[in-house]
Image (cartoon, rainbow, N blue to C red):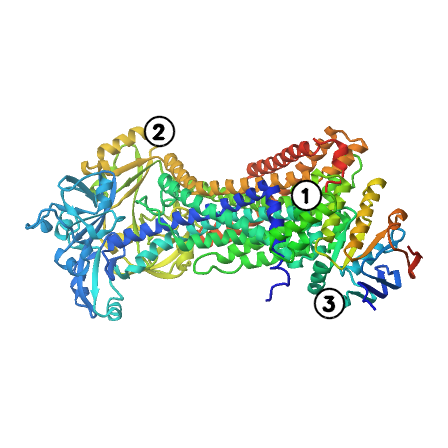
Amino acid sequence: MTLPRLDVRAVGKSVPGPRRLFAGLDLAVQGGELVAILGESGVGKSTLLNILAGLDDADEGTVAIEGITLGPLDEAARTRLRRERIGFVFQAFHILPYLTLAQNVALPLALVSSDARAAQTRAEAMLEAVGLGGRGGGYARDLSGGELQRVAIARALVHAPALILADEPTGNLDPETAARVLALFGSAVRERGAAGVIVTHSDATAAIADRVLTLTAEGLVERRGR
Amino acid sequence: MAAEPGLWSGRLALGWLIGGEWRFHPGRFLLTAVAIAVGVALGFAVHLINGSALASFDGAVRGVGGGAELSVRATSPLGFDEHLYPRVARAVGVRDASPVVKLDARIGTARLTLLGLDVIRAAAVTPALIGIAPERGNDTMFAEDAVFLSRAALAQAGTRIGARVTVTANGRSVPLRIAGTLPGAGDTASLAVIDIAAAQWRFGRLGKLDRIDLAVSDRAAAEAALANLPDASLSAAEAQNAQGDALSRAYRVNLDMLALVALLTGGFLVYSAQSLSVARRQRAFALLRTLGMPRGGVVAAVAVEGLAIGVVGAGVGLAAGYAMAWAALHWFGGDLGAGYFGGGTVRLAFQPGAAFGFFALGLAAAALGSAIPARLAARAAPAAALKNAGDVLDPRARVAWWPAAVLLVVGGAVTLLPPVGGLPLFGFTGMALLLAGGVAGVPWFARVLLTPLARRSGASVPRRLAIRHLHGAPNDAATALCGIVASTALMIAMATMITSFRGAVDDWLGQVLGADLYLRTNAGAVFDPAAQARLAATPGVARAAFSRQLPLTIAPDRPPITLIARPEQGTRDPLRVLIAPAVPLPPGARPVWVSEPAQRLYGWNPGDSLTLPIGGGARFTVAGVWRDYGRQTGAVLVDAQDYQRLTGDTGRDELAAMLRPGADAGAVTAAIQARLPADLRDQVEITRPATLRRFALTLFDRSFAVTYLLEAIAILVGLAGVAATISAQTMAREREFGMLRHLGLTRRQLTAMLATEGALVGLTGALAGIALGLVLAQVLIHVINPQSFNFTMSTRIPLGTLAAVAAALSGAAAATAILAGRRATARGAVQSVREDW
């Protein structure tokens, strides 16, 4: 049996108050699979995403990426894991305005290698793949919201991560642009065999996923398969 | 410590991050580098000037000393009896001894040191002082009219070998022929050498010597044998250099410290700029942390930026400092107008050690200015920073006061510690801690200051917004203000100290200049008893008080004190401004009145018994301590009759004349001039008290002119920091302004809001700076000044300066905020609220 790219077992988390956000949360995501997690505002979607990324600690349970359990890892090891095995897509794009688009895309590569030429070449190829070929020398201010998010997707995929985490990736886009970006995101994740997790409160966004789960205080409840 | 994993491998990303910031904000980078450059340049220039002046002074002292390892030196210009020579020459451990007559002399307006030497003895002990004549084979060396000049003396007198010149010394003018030069005297010593017999005979020094240079076979034995000599003391060459060092050391250290204020201000400016830059890039750092950059990478990015600012700033600063030192030496002289080194020729000498030190200081200022922002940047949780988008302001958050309080209390306590090696090092350390405490307390101060205003509800919307913003975000104001608070505080402290000092000097001059006319001789000339009698009988003169002033060496390695012999006038003596009640003396005790600096330097207290090196060593009892702002190295006042009995010296070099009521000062001056002996007429200055007072205050102002300049530069750097920071903070709020315009605020109202904010920030900075400055002034007045210059005084507050500083700062900050606000509101309201990431 293939090891899941992401394996979450009995994870629980409370926030100061104390208020229990969720408990007993289980999730396994295989390579090439895209999972959407739905939930109301404040239910803990982003907190869960942070736990999956090793940016926050679960109060209970384990999270493993490609078989590596995050819990025992120190900050340096988690940082290394994030750098090498995880890609991120954010609602607010977070494209650095003073770097070229190619540099923005190449950032994950630049964090592990000093070969600027190779990083640049891969970034250009990635931009080509998301439909922004030849735009690598431009800057964020030249692009629309949809284009910026495509750059962000390119950045999330450029270092061939095992897991891609997306937090409301179309929250800042109009429905038409959102649909195009999501289609691109879904196919890119599947083509590269990565495991994808999208957290969102939008049914339309969740519709592109292979599985849709709803986050509740009791854990994840599966809505439908694909 | 091992490097954080991934830090090195992530260097490409770090490079992009830093490079991108510089490309986008080159002005910020340049401004902070310039701030460091100004600080380094000032510090390095002042240090170079002082070092060059001291090196030239040492060179001159060495030149005059001729390289003798040990010398017996007269404790006063009266010299010592030449019968001491055989005793010294035959002392155990002495191999050879060269007698010297040493006089202060002049050729025209050029001042120089005239030495009378026994050429045979000098050739064995101080060959560097032997003159070389162009013509050989004659007895030029022994000719009674032959004088040899050093290169510096020739240049200053504007003369040449073979010319005849009139040399004036000890009140005599003697025509001499320049027979040759003194190649061994070095470049800086302004020196003339003649035969010793000619010096004694033609300059009225028969039977007297001023120095005996020694060649020793056993130095320890010689020192033991010559420990106690009448009116003379044994002195090593290094002690002579130490005198010059001691004389100016406190002044030089104080000037260095003042120059470093500009560097400190530059460091604060780096802190402001880096804090803003970090705050602006909070989400960028958070993104990189999320993508896998280690925490140390963020610290490294900010630290590398700080170091680059430091390297560029310090490098430019060194070059600018060297140029400034050259210009200052060219235009103002080696002591920058303070009068410590007598206006000799000073050559600029590059000092690699100082250059390295100031480069390191510049680097340290920039690195330390970046350290706190770097730590804050690394500490932020990446996920929260990405979500909060930097809007983490909580106006309810308490502002910590205790770090400031701890620094202030520790700083205050440190200032109470005694000086180290005669320097107020703990005083300066305490000031630095007080300054840090004051700057750390600015957020708390701003919150306290604005709380009453924030509670009022009657103000207009723009004003309420401005007050609420500053009240809620006092750390923003503190970031903008830290540089200017530091420089303002130090400026106010210096201004208060100088105002207090100047006021005290002015009052003191008013008290001591009680006569109507003052006469003073120069070039060693004196009024003999006949001249004194004739002058005292001048029509219109009611009372004439003659006095004698002599430098008197108490310790060979310390600058001489001034011995003042005056007729006993009891409490009528205007010079005797006592700072403590006089003590009754035991019967038969010989009284001496010591000045405040002499008391502090030598520990002479009322009732103490002390020995002065005159008349073979005479015991005196301290009758009281008098205030004296004129002689930093100390002075003692003795009765003229005691002085005359002890030394046999009947000459006097000063006269204070009280005129009869109704007498015309101009007519009396003319009458006095007519009564002066013919050979004294061009060697006596007659001045009125108002002129003396003006002259003294002009000298005072000149010696502090550099101080004012350094202060002004520090303030300008601080103002530039306020302008840059307020401007950056205002521009960063573009979206807030767009939102406010959506809500209905007009551009005019926004401008009013920003002007109010700017004025409040400036006023807060000015008030904090003034309050802190007045505290620091107390350290300057009651710790640094007494420990450095041995003067005490009471505080006088320069109210005009305080008001001007408060107005200038508020105005400048408001103007900056308005200008930046215009730019920030220039874009349309819709565009401004659009997410610009």
The answer to whether any part of residue B445 appears in the image is: no
Work out whether residue B270 or residue B531 is closer to the camera in this orientation and state it.
Answer: B270
Disc 2 + disc 3, Cβ < 8 Å: no
Work out whether residue B208 or residue B709 is closer to the camera in this orientation and state it.
Answer: B709
Q: How many marks?
A: 3
**Residue carrying label 1:** A97
Q: Earlier in the sequence, mark 3 or mark 1?
A: 3
Residue B353 in the image, given as x and y percentages of width and height? 41, 55
Q: Secondary structure at mark 1?
A: loop
Chain containing the residue with disc 1: A
Q: Amino acid at mark 2?
A: Gly
Seen in the image, is B93 located left or right of residue B515? left
Q: Quadrant of the C terminus of chain B?
A: top right
Disc 2 + disc 1, Cβ < 8 Å: no
**Residue carrying label 2:** B662
The reply to the same-chain question for discs 2 and 1 is no
- Distance (Cα) linking label 2 and label 3: 100 Å
Q: Secondary structure at mark 3?
A: loop
Crowding at dot 2, Cα within 10 Å, few <14 / some 14-19 / many 20+, comes out as few
Crowding at dot 3, Cα within 10 Å, few <14 / some 14-19 / many 20+, comes out as few
Disc 3 + disc 1, Cβ < 8 Å: no
Crowding at dot 1, Cα within 10 Å, few <14 / some 14-19 / many 20+, comes out as some
- Distance (Cα) linking label 2 and label 1: 86 Å
The residue located at (46%, 52%) in the rendering is B358
Res B464 → quadrant: top right
Q: Amino acid at mark 3?
A: Leu
Work out whether residue B310 or residue B631 is closer to the camera in this orientation and state it.
Answer: B310
Q: Secondary structure at mark 2?
A: loop
**Residue carrying label 3:** A73
Q: Amino acid at mark 1?
A: Pro
Residue B162 in the image, given as x and y percentages of width and height? 13, 41
Chain containing the residue with disc 3: A
